């Protein structure tokens, strides 16, 4: 798990004030980190184009050019001149090698974007958009210094944002690189050491990035255990039976001892799943909403929910008149996709917006919801899943386009419900369920369009 930051300039200032580093020392380490990455991947004398801005991000690029010059065919393009003191100093050093900035070459094996980085605080002008459009058409391998130019700290992708294969973040990770839209432009992300270990450079943050190593499977260690040891998940089986069956099947595969579908009428189920018309006495958690429709009247739902069992909610329940009351419960996990979350925000009186507005401000609205309902755990689905409770937030970046398939969300609800039934607290159930969900899909070895919910369920057996 790694820390994420809205901005890292305050960490830079702290490193200067507390540890006696200078901006120039940190810049040389940043350039050195990029140099090492390039040398590991690309053998001399390949051609490298470094496009530099007029500020300190451009200075990083000029320092990189100085380090690589002599082994590689270096071209430096400086369309805005050099304005910051460090940019002027690095340009002077580059010129003392007998080199000058040049026009854009027609081709390059590697293209490095050192135009704006995370310092961009205004929309890109027409000239910058045109330049980035040209860079994006070049066929070489693309590396962004700090953050792709055109990507804002809020994770909004501007027109013609640089489309990086690699992004080398300076010192620590910017949260904006993990918006859904940013996934299209950041590529593989590396963090450059700036001359001090990250434990000294970083400060505590409410936002965290989940790594594959953060997955902890519900493996069984008690030799004398029985099925009752591992809980009983009750899945409310509504109008669309398939959604409930998928969720229940996922829960059974993820360690729950017993799974029952609660239905009004007898339905045909896989043999391993139980069926009941009322809540079993041994229930330890509930899953509600997937495929619910209008199968249950309000009184029936009230009777099912007249308890304090941990609860995972999805899909149709968010539009139900009972939903605001459910938000008052203590042990509750919500798993909306973006359109459902706009409905939740509207019902809660937080905001009234379209999906695109939400997607441009996912971080902010997740924070607002969790502040208003500090006991609830939010799992906001997307390419990069946001998981939050109160003031603690986690981003799961391991989602894949293969999950864009009906039933995938039902699997997620089942996985989280399984952990709730086994006694895992709601926040950890959400984190572990989300990680298992995405990592199973990520490990799918066949064509990404072919993934089905049952492939995800099968995949969790060998994580």
Image: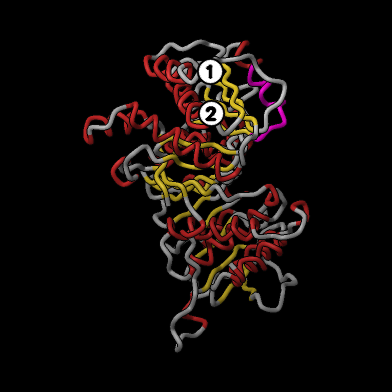
Q: Is residue 29 left or right of residue 231?
A: left
Give the mark nearest the N terminus, 1 or 2.
Answer: 2
Q: Nearer the viewer, residue 458 or 417?
A: 458
User: x and y percent of residue 357 in the render?
Assistant: 57, 28
Q: Is residue 28 left or right of residue 276?
A: left
Is residue 209 among the parts visible in the rendering?
yes
Q: Secondary structure at mark 1?
A: loop
Q: Secondary structure at mark 2?
A: loop
For the point 68% across and 20% down, the residue is 105
What is the CA distance from the residue labelled 1 to the residue labelled 2? Answer: 9 Å
Residue neighbourhood size for the residue with mark 1, other residues' Cα within 10 Å, grouped as few (<14), some (14–19), many (≥20): some
Q: Which residue is the site of mark 2?
A: 69
Q: Is residue 179 magenta?
A: no
> Which image quadrant is residue 172 in?
top left
Up the image or down, 245 lies above or below 438; here it is: below
Is residue 321 among the parts visible in the rendering?
no
User: x and y percent of residue 113 in the render?
Assistant: 56, 26
The colour style of the image is: secondary structure
Up the image or down, 417 lies above or below 139; here it is: below
Q: Which residue is the site of mark 1?
A: 99
Q: Is residue 230 left or right of residue 8?
A: right
Which label number is shown at residue 242? none
**In this picture, which residue range is highlighted in magenta?**
131-141
For the point 49% across and 68% down, the residue is 421
Contact? badges 1 and 2 (CB < 8 Å): yes
For the point 52% across and 73% down, the residue is 232
Please give the count of numbered marks on the rendered protein: 2
Q: Nearer the viewer, residue 305 or 379?
A: 379
């Amino acid at each position: 798990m790694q820390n994420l930051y809205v901005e890292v300039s305050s960490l830079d200032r702290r490193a200067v004030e507390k540890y006696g580093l200078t901006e120039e020392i940190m810049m040389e380490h940043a350039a050195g980190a990029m140099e090492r990455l390039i040398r590991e991947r690309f053998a001399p004398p390949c051609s490298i184009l470094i496009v530099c801005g007029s500020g300190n991000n451009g200075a990083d690029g000029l320092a990189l050019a100085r380090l690589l010059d002599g082994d590689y065919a270096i071209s430096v393009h400086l369309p805005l001149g050099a304005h910051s003191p460090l940019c002027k100093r690095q340009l002077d050093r580059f010129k003392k090698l007998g080199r000058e900035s040049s026009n854009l070459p027609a081709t390059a094996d590697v293209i490095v974007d050192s135009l704006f980085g995370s310092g961009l605080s205004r929309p890109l002008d027409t000239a910058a958009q045109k330049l980035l459009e040209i860079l994006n058409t070049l066929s070489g391998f693309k590396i962004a210094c700090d953050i792709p130019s055109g990507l804002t700290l809020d994770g909004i992708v501007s027109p013609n944002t640089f489309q990086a294969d690699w992004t080398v973040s300076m010192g620590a990770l910017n949260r904006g690189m993990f918006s859904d839209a940013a996934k299209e432009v950041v590529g593989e992300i590396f963090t450059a050491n700036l001359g001090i270990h990250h434990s000294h450079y970083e400060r505590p943050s409410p936002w965290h990035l989940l790594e594959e190593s953060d997955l902890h499977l519900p493996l069984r260690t008690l030799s004398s255990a029985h099925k009752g040891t591992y809980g009983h998940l009750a899945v409310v089986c509504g109008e669309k039976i398939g959604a409930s069956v998928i969720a229940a099947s996922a829960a059974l595969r993820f360690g729950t001892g017993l799974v029952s579908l609660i239905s009004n009428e007898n339905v045909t189920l896989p043999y391993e799943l139980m069926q009941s018309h009322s809540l079993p006495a041994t229930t330890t958690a509930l899953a509600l909403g997937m495929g619910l429709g209008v199968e249950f009247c309000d009184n029936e739902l009230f009777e099912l929910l007249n308890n304090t069992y941990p609860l995972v909610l999805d899909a149709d329940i968010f539009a139900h008149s009972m939903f605001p009351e459910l938000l008052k419960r203590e042990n509750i996990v919500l798993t909306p996709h973006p359109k459902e979350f706009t409905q939740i925000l509207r019902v809660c009186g937080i905001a009234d917006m379209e999906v695109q507005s939400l997607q441009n401000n996912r971080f902010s609205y997740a924070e607002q919801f969790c502040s208003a309902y500090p006991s609830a755990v939010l799992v906001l689905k997307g390419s990069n899943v946001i998981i939050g409770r109160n003031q603690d937030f986690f981003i799961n970046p391991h989602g894949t386009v293969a999950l864009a398939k009906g039933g995938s969300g039902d699997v997620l609800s089942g996985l989280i419900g399984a952990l709730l039934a086994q006694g895992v607290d709601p926040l950890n159930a959400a984190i572990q369920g989300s990680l298992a969900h995405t990592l199973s899909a990520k490990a799918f070895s066949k064509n990404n369009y072919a993934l089905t919910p049952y492939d995800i369920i099968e995949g969790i057996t060998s994580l």
